[in-house]
Amino acid sequence: MRVEARAPTRVDLAGGTVDIWPLYLFHPGAQTVNIAIRWYASCVVETRADRRIVLISADRKIQESYESLGELARAKSALPLVRELTVFFEPRRGVTVRTVSEVPAGAGLGGSSALNIALCGGLARVTGRRVTRAQILEIAKNIEAIVIRVPTGWQDYFPALYGGSNAVHLESDGVKREKLPLPASELEKRFVLCYTGQPHDSAINNWEVMKSHIDGDPRVRKNFNQIATIAGQMREALLAGDWNDVAELLALEWENRKRNFKGISTPKIDRMIEQSRKYGTKAAKVCGAGGGGCVVFQVEPGTKPAVEECLRQLGGDIINFSVSRTGLEVRSDHETWGEESPEG
């Protein structure tokens, strides 16, 4: 049996890091706003005639082979996420698990979470385990925490599972996704996504900020109050199609986020944002936890090519993205990927 699974990565516009439990409980009305993009993390899971477990990462050029699931469970793998999920789903026979991500490691686009979701979908199909999307979310979130050894946020799993534009509401009685009916064409012409060439470590950055918050740092708590408020306003501005407000809120979110931890911005990021203003950038912020990775730029309509060329001259790699209207997709053997349905 051969199963392929893929899940989209995301661009976060507001409210990141607040989605880590229990931070959002201290900020009533907390939410995050993000957009799934058609840059995927994917896996291929194939059953074998023997009991061997073979793990392969195409983009990291790593291959590991184990005599059995038991040996894998006892091993220290260079692919810990793949290892943990394979052990969790307990295939009854040998499998080969191949993974690949279209986004660079440390890009801040939720690539590890998207791969996590894809692996859950692929391994569940191969092992015959019936799981709902809500169950996949719980499995993915808990396994990722085991792997990175620090608490994880909620927001990255929703675009990977469902696609589209999302407001993730972080409430005392649960975390809930709201699908935002935003026109993909507007988002695609008004935003530029650029990889700085500097990977970041989201686990370290988020953990440092979280520790400061839990320890009662009044500056960090004040910043998070502002970030939570901005996320709610960002949702309203996007729904209203008020792009001037969106730009103001994007810039304000970035200013508050930079105050949380000194390593969130870098000289290269600051230079990219400042110099691209001459060509049409209205506002920008780092994706994910910062310290490198990708930056999303909101630009004036019609200026996207000029802004992209400016960023290339500054050493950036442009990620030509489009909105992914679908989330996790799983197909067996000779099935084809489903067509994306229009989003309102």
Image: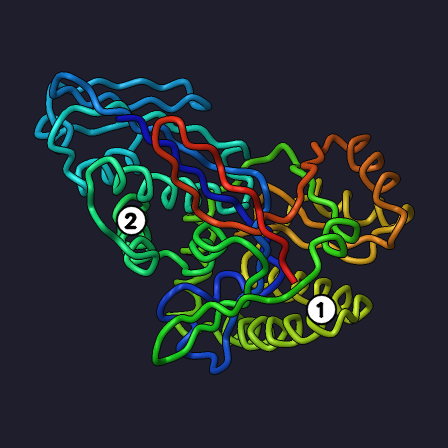
Using the numbered discs, state the Cα–Cα distance from disc 2 to disc 1 in whole angstroms: 32 Å
Q: Position of residue 194 (x, y in %)?
A: 69, 40
Name the quadrant containing residue 86: top left
Q: Amino acid at mark 2?
A: Arg
Q: Quadrant of the N terminus?
A: top left
User: In terms of depth relative to the viewer, which is nearer, 204 or 162?
Assistant: 162
Question: Which image quadrant: the C terminus?
Answer: bottom right
Packing grade of label 2 (10 A; few <14, some 14-19, many >=20) is few
Q: Position of residue 79 (x, y in %)?
A: 31, 30
Q: Which residue is mark 2?
A: 149
Q: Position of residue 5 (x, y in %)?
A: 39, 37
Q: Which mark is residue 249?
A: 1
Q: With respect to residue 77, does 191 lie above or below?
A: below
Q: Relative to 271, is 131 on the left or the right?
A: left
Question: Which label lies toward us, 2 or 1?
Answer: 1
* Residue drawn at (43%, 23%) of the image: 60
Q: Residues within 10 Å of mark 1 (few under 14, many from 20)?
A: many
Which numbered dot is residue 88?
A: none
Q: Residue at x 80, y 38 (%)?
A: 308
Residue 299 coordinates in the image, percent (x, y): 82, 53
Determine whether 131 is above or below 242 in the image.
above
Q: Amino acid at mark 1?
A: Leu
Quarter-of-image position of residue 230: bottom right
Q: Earlier in the sequence, mark 2 or mark 1?
A: 2
Name the side, left or right, on which 87 lies relative to 210.
Answer: left
User: SS class of the residue under badge 1?
Assistant: helix
